[in-house]
Each structure stands twice: as C-alpha cells, then as structure tokens.
C-alpha cells in the first residue's frame, strides 16, 4: 500500500511569531516515509526544529519573520502502521473529560441511550448515533466549539463528529481519543479528524462522518482532542492563514468501507 500526501499553506504574519506545525505523517512502526518540508519567507528558507510527540507524531517549530510565508510538505508512504499498545497509562489518559470532549456533561444522555451495551457493540452504536443525528455542514461550527455544542446544534465538521464520538464513549468508560489524519478518498479534500476507541485490548478507528475509508488513513497527530492535534498553532504574534490545499491519494486503489464494523486506522 502506497499513499502520497501534500499540504500547502500560505500565511501572513503581522509581526514575528513562533509557528508550530503538525502536518508531517506520524513515524509509526511499519511505515517507510519519504518526506520533504519547506518553509519560505520571501526568498529566505526558514529552518524548523523537529519535536517528537506522543504516538510517533512530530511537530515542526519555526520562528517566523513578519511578512508572507509559504509552507510545502509532501510525503510518499509505503507500508501499514503496525499496532502499538501504549499501555494502561494511555488508556487512563483518555477516560477523562477534556477541553473539547466534555464527557462528564454527556453522562446522563449516554447512560440512557447505551445502557446494557458494551465492547464493539457499544462502540459501533455510538458512531452510528453520532452519524444519525449530526449533519455535516462546512463552516457550521466555530474553532472553540466542543462536543456539547455539536450535541445541541446537531451540525458540524469532521472534528465535531470526532469530539462527540470521543465524549460519548468516555462517558461510558471507554478510552477514546482524537486523531488528525490524511484521508485518501475524502471529498472535499482537507485535513481530516477521526476517533479511536480502546476495546478488546486494541485501538479501533471510528469515523462518524463516513467520508473516507478508515483503511486508507495516515496518522498525523493523536491526542485528547483538537487542542492536542491542531495542524497549526501560533505564539507571540498574529498569523493569518491565507490559503490551504491538501491532497491525499492511494495506490493501487481505495478500499471499501461501509463504516459498520471494527477497523484499525490505516490497516
């Protein structure tokens, strides 16, 4: 299995700022990654520092001057991500409420809806519930919205679907986390967000949007919610995102996925 991904960003910095990027494919065991990152300010090439993060992720930290900045990332990836059990500490970390996945506020609703269900039946039931009650509408949510906003508004984009899935699962004592991914087959193409749930001693991928086959996904960043997985964070100055273009393709062909069963991310 070969996947090819690109990400192009154009930025405008009104003052010097520190930029933290999470666009590189996570360096998971089982993957052979040939990648290239270029960050330019005018005719100057800026050097980024690599910082390793959880679940084999990598962030790039770069100090930007004021002015226009362009970023290009591309990677060709061979192979399949090998399963990596991070242990009990990782499970516990994803059982508690977080900034965008307020599982404590969903306790009563989830108890009423999913009482008596467990294991894969519970996990699939939660994903089906989120998919059935939430409309995917581009631009319908704000960057500050969490799972409760999505629950009340019944609309959102991929990160909102993932946050509601994660929060509902945690409220039923299932460890759950959010994963930012490249998603071959996604339309419209962009960065994508899905959930992972820990059941039967493995992490399983859930995409309540149903917009891309889970077997095609490439992990970028993994964390409690979008606060841990944002593709771009800025500190010390104001930076405006002028444009973004993401591509993700797969060879030899996209797998079929009706999103009804248990599938591991990218496998």
Image (spheres, rainbow, N blue to C red):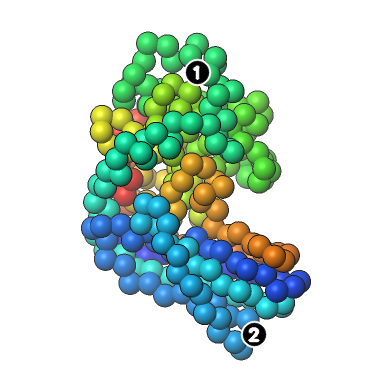
Whole-percent x and y of residue 243?
64, 65
Instruction: Using the image, determine if residue 24 lies above or below residue 115.
Output: below
Instruction: Using the image, determine if residue 234 lies above or below residue 143.
Output: below
Q: Is residue 136 shown to the viewer in this render? A: no
> Looking at the image, which residue is at 53% across and 27% down?
103
Residue for badge 2:
42
Question: Disc 2 on helix, strand or loop?
Answer: loop
Mark 1: few, some, or many residues within 10 Å (few <14, many ≥20)?
Answer: some
Whole-percent x and y of residue 128?
44, 26
Instruction: Using the image, determine if residue 50 lies above or below residue 104.
Output: below
Mark 2: few, some, or many residues within 10 Å (few <14, many ≥20)?
Answer: few
Whole-percent x and y of residue 215?
31, 47
Picture quadrant where residue 71 is located: bottom right
In the image, farthest residue toward the right: 14
Position of 166 with respect to 197 (left or right) is right
Name the foreground residue: 190 vs 228: 228
Find the distance from the CA under tag 2 to the CA under tag 1. Answer: 52 Å
In the image, farthest residue toward the bottom: 43
Which label number is shown at residue 220?
none
> Looking at the image, which residue is at 53% across and 63% down?
21
> Looking at the image, which residue is at 52% across and 49% down?
228
Residue for badge 1:
110
């Amino acid at each position: 299995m070969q996947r090819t991904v690109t990400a192009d960003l154009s930025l405008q910095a009104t003052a010097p700022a520190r930029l933290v990027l999470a666009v590189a494919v996570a360096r998971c065991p089982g993957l052979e990654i040939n990648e290239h990152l270029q960050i330019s300010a005018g005719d100057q090439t800026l050097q980024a520092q690599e910082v390793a993060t959880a679940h084999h992720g990598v962030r790039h930290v770069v100090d930007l001057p004021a002015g226009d900045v362009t970023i290009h990332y591309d990677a060709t990836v061979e192979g399949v991500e090998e399963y990596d059990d991070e242990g009990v500490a990782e499970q516990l970390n994803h059982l508690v409420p977080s900034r965008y996945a307020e599982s404590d506020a969903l306790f009563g609703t989830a108890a009423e809806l999913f009482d008596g269900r467990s294991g894969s039946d519970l996990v699939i039931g939660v994903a089906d519930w989120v998919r059935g009650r939430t409309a995917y509408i581009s631009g319908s949510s704000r960057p500050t919205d969490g799972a409760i906003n999505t629950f009340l508004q019944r609309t959102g984009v991929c990160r909102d679907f993932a946050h509601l899935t994660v929060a509902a699962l945690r409220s039923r004592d299932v460890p759950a986390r959010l994963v930012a991914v490249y998603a071959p087959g996604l339309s419209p193409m962009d960065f994508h967000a899905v959930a992972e749930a820990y059941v039967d001693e493995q992490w399983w991928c859930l995409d309540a949007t149903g917009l891309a086959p889970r077997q095609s996904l490439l992990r970028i960043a993994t964390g409690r919610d979008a606060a841990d997985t944002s593709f771009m964070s800025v500190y010390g100055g104001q930076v405006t995102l002028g444009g973004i273009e993401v591509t993700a393709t797969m060879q030899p062909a996209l797998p079929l996925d009706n999103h009804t069963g248990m599938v591991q991310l990218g496998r």
